[in-house]
Image (cartoon, helix red, strand yellow):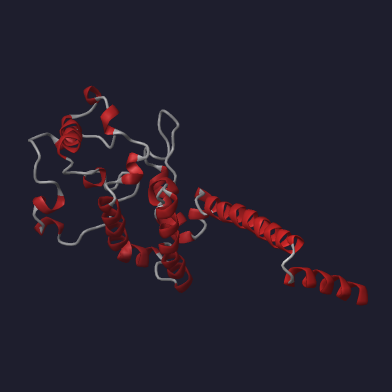
Amino acid sequence: MAEGRNFILRYWGLLRGRSTVAMGIVAGFCFLAGIIFWFGFNWVMAVTNTEEFCIGCHEMKDNVYPAYTESIHYSNRSGVRAMCSSCHVPHNMTDKIIRKIQASKEVWGTITGKINTPEKFAEHRLHLAQREWKRFKKNDSLECRNCHDQSFMNFDKQQPPGVFMHREMLQTGKYTCIDCHKGIAHVLPEIENLEDISPALLEPAMRPPYNHAVTTQE
């Protein structure tokens, strides 16, 4: 016991001094702590971006995940998938950290049982969807553009409404992906009194005549 105490006192004396040895010890500890923090931080960011983590709570697994598994983002002819974090977590590190902090509210919602039943989730679904639509609109559908680049789209393989809207995006920048692609991976929330709402409020006003029946999700 005495030897251990003497060992601690010896190195404490070195650290209190201004010797090169003391500075080296401090620098070494700081460097080691920085490495541990950096790897730990990146590990946490990576784990919380996995699909398994996202559907770890039954609110997500039971309410939104089933519809996602039926979408083209989950399974398609090319095998290229967009996971939850591909669309709901920014790829830029600064924005990603901000989004992770914001997500703490969702954890609190799980703890307090705010949307822990299908009925409660349905009640809040429109609000949750509108919050995400607003975020996509604000950042010009950045998460969509991380994978999709309209400047390389083949318009010959698109339906007329898609050709029109994508050209409008390129030429005027008036629209963004989320303006048309709401519900591409999840079931759209129910909107009360939908028949009383003007179509101009639901779709961009500048649309040519076309047949909705021939449009596709792609």
Q: Which residue is drawn at 42% across and 44% down?
A: 69
Is residue 131 visible in this depiction of the protein? yes
Q: Where is residue 131 in the image (x, y as percent from the top left)?
A: 29, 59
Along the line of sight, which residue is nearer the eye, 173 or 123? 173
Indicate whether 115 appears above or below 165.
below
Q: Where is residue 174 in the image (x, y as percent from the top left)?
A: 16, 43
Q: Where is residue 146 in the image (x, y as percent from the top left)?
A: 37, 40
Q: Residue at x 8, y 36 (%)?
A: 208
Q: Quadrant of residue 210?
A: top left
Is residue 1 visible in this depiction of the protein? no
Along the line of sight, which residue is nearer the eye, 133 or 189? 133
Q: Residue at x 18, y 41 (%)?
A: 173
Judge from the rendering whether residue 33 lies leftward or rightward of residue 160; answer left or right.
right
Q: Where is residue 46 in the image (x, y as percent from the top left)?
A: 54, 50
Q: Quadrant of residue 143?
A: top left
Judge from the rendering whether residue 202 lies leftward or rightward of residue 80; answer left or right.
left
